Amino acid sequence: MKVVQLFPDLLGTYGDSGNGEILFRRARARGVGASYQRVFYGDPIPRDGDIFVLGGGEDGPMQLARDALHRDGFLGDLSSTNHQILAICAGLQILGERFVTSKSPSSPGLGVIPIVTERIENHKRIVGEVVVEADSALELPILTGYENHGGESRLLEGVPLGRVISGVGNSYSSKIDGFFNDRIIGTYMHGPVLARNPLLADLIICRLEPKGLNSFSPLEVDREVEQLRENILSQRGMSLSRRIGLR
Ligand code: GLN
């Protein structure tokens, strides 16, 4: 299993460039032969990756990342292969139909995710903790992250990653976060999201074909991670006992 962290020099806000390493380490801890490659701006994108990870970024760097992905043609190749993609915030926005930047209200996205990102009407940047109940099909516990974005996203079709319990997510009015299908998970949760929600990392690995990884053995619970999750949820009057389908 090869994990590719795309452009950590452009898309790596709030620890996001650590997500790839978490996937790699959690696979290795189960004895899965795994490798991890960081692909910097200007480097060729390897075609033999299994999981590609995009983080969040500022308006300028995210446009450079969009242009590099477009030039490379990498996403065109994806349609005929079997990759998993995790895209956070700016990563999610550039994979959408179009997005907003400080200089342009409508910059073309890569059209991989049916989402458009527009300027927030009152220009009130969305900043803070976010808590999400993931779609029940994913069988995940409550997810937590940190969001910081100046655009609001509208899902044109498809399924959001989950329902926002606290915080904002895609937009002030929708109360949903991100998007998922069988190949892509997109979210506004930074943190990095996979450190804060390790079972989301395991889910992404388990979604790879062949599905032999389905019998993934549980790892010992990381007390620090659980404590962090407990603290964040208890500040919002919730508790970890409210888990959804925890294995
Ligand atoms: N620049 C984008 C926005 O402000 C994405 C921000 C981010 O990735 N944190 O909406």
Image (cartoon, rainbow, N blue to C red):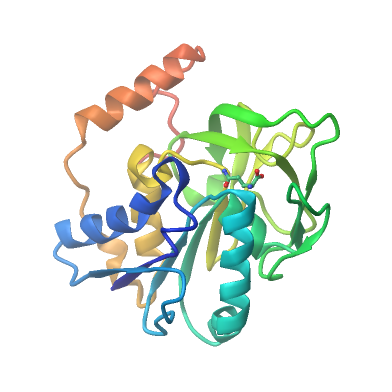
Q: Is residue 141 above or below residue 53?
A: above
- 32 or 39, which is in the foreground? 39
Residue at x-position 13% and y-position 64%:
31
- 14 or 131, which is in the foreground? 14
- 236 or 89, which is in the foreground? 89
Residue at x-position 45% and y-position 25%:
242
Picture coordinates of residue 198, whole percent (x, y): 33, 44
**Where's ligand 1: which quadrant?**
top right
Picture coordinates of residue 164, whole percent (x, y): 62, 33
Count all numbered tags in the image, as a single digit.
Answer: 0
Q: Is residue 202 visible?
A: yes
Quarter that holds the N terminus: bottom left
Q: Quadrant of residue 206?
A: bottom left
Q: Quadrant of residue 65?
A: bottom right
Q: Quadrant of residue 203?
A: bottom left
Residue at x-position 42% and y-position 58%:
9
Picture coordinates of residue 126, whole percent (x, y): 66, 31
Tell me if 235 is positioned left or right of 230 in this view: right
Picture coordinates of residue 191, whole percent (x, y): 42, 38
- 181 or 191, which is in the foreground? 191
Q: Is residue 57 above or below residue 157?
A: above
Q: Is residue 247 visible?
A: no
Quarter that holds the C terminus: top left
